[in-house]
Amino acid sequence: MKKIFFTVGPSQLYPTVVGHIKKALKKNIPSISHRGDQFMKIYEETCQSLKRLLAIPKNYHIFFLGSSLESMERILQNCADKHSFHFIDGAFSQKLYQFSEKLGLKPEKVEIIPEVGFDFAKVKIPKKTELICLTHNETSSGMVIPVKEIYRLRKKYPKKLIAVDIVSSAPYLHLDFSKVDAAFFSGQKGFGLPAGLGVLIVSDRAVKKAKNVGTYHNFASLLKYELKNQSPETPNVLTIYLLGEVTKDMLKKGIAKIRKETEEKAKLIYDFFDKNKENKPFIQEKRFRSSTTIVINIKNGSKKVLKKLKTHGIVVGSGYGENKEKQIRIANFPSHSKQAVQKLLKFF
Ligand SMILES: *Cc1c(COP(=O)(O)O)cnc(C)c1O
């Protein structure tokens, strides 16, 4: 049976992906050399399209890595000697904090209770902090940090580097990249691609300040190859190609339209569950509600609901961690049509 995947990643493929895979096979993309002209052109075009779609400044660098967990590790190794500071609003921001500890840094944190909200203006970040880390869209809790809070940090702490996890909000989020030093996402979330590609966007100042810890994937090594439209290792050529093609499709559609549609679908979902007697949105305060990964408390447990949805050909995510059976998580990516969302809501 053909299924619709509302899971938060991997998720529903972007509608054009199957066609692009077929075309890639015809063009022998999986066999071409990662040092040849054809690949270098793919690399260059993918970066150019991404920069246009997301309005990334020209002097920012784009590195292709294995995953977003890898991006997290590379940012910590390259952007801080000792002192990172973390806003924790769920499992992924927590993971980054733990990575920092494991790498021998001395991270500090402020903990947010996602369902309640938070006064960002009150946070005091220590003088010694080199790197501030935020998760724009916490996929585990469905909390979003408004970008203006990130800009406020930039203004207050202009010398510190800022890293933002945009894994489950790109390409929807509207971020002024000139106000951050590192941002990263994975293909299998909002871009609707197969898993196995991490994209790390870094400012020139972050590259210049880089500590270059590690081997082939330290920033100096990544930069050296990026300047040749290559990567140090044999990369995920096929998915880099697919990312380029899907990004071009999104450019044709227009990012404004993608954002508007995302907001309309999110409103449908939130309005529906705000009125639902049994199942309610987890995040209370509207400005902290994610538009792309929506978490709903399920009164009678998620297990039965997920099973029943499956018989209708709809796959939805369970809650994360300890909320596995108490919640469901609904992805609202550009791959999800309004009709599919309506079909999902009809079930409830
Ligand atoms: C999925 C996800 C990650 C990890 O991505 P991988 O590609 O699995 O490494 C990190 N942060 C957030 C917010 C995510 O949703």
Image (tube, rainbow, N blue to C red):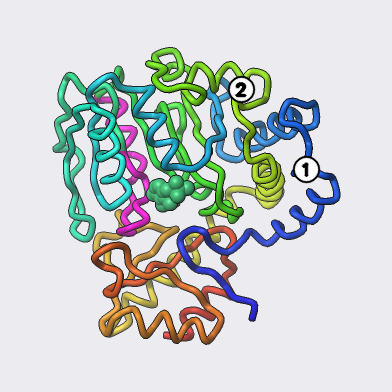
Q: Is residue 75 above or below residue 312?
A: above
Mark 2: few, some, or many residues within 10 Å (few <14, many ≥20)? many
| Residue at 60% from the left image edge and 54% from the top image edge | 194
| Label 1: which secondary element | helix
Place residue 301 in its image quadrant: bottom left
Q: Quadrant of the C terminus?
A: bottom left
Amino acid, disc 2: Glu
Residue 317 seen? yes
Per the model, the C-alpha gap separating discs 2 and 1 is 20 Å
Q: Is residue 323 magenta?
A: no
* Residue 67 location (% of width, % of height): 49, 43
Answer with mark 2 or mark 1, whichever residue precedes in sequence. 1
- Seen from the viewer's position, the closer of residues 285 and 79 is 79
The tally of labels here is 2
Q: In which quarter of the image is the N terminus?
A: bottom right
Q: Is residue 346 above or below residue 104?
A: below
Place residue 4 in its image quadrant: bottom right
- Seen from the viewer's position, the closer of residues 20 and 271 is 20
Front of the two marks 2 and 1:
1
Residue 251 seen? no
**Chain part drawn in magenta:** 134-156
Disc marking residue 225: none
- Seen from the viewer's position, the closer of residues 269 and 104 is 104
Amino acid, disc 1: Ile
- Seen from the viewer's position, the closer of residues 184 and 287 is 184
* Residue 59 location (% of width, % of height): 55, 20
Mark 1: few, some, or many residues within 10 Å (few <14, many ≥20)? some
Q: What residue is pinned by disc 1? A: 29
| Residue at 66% from the left image edge and 49% from the top image edge | 250
Q: In this view, does 13 lie above or below 45?
A: below
Disc marking residue 226: 2
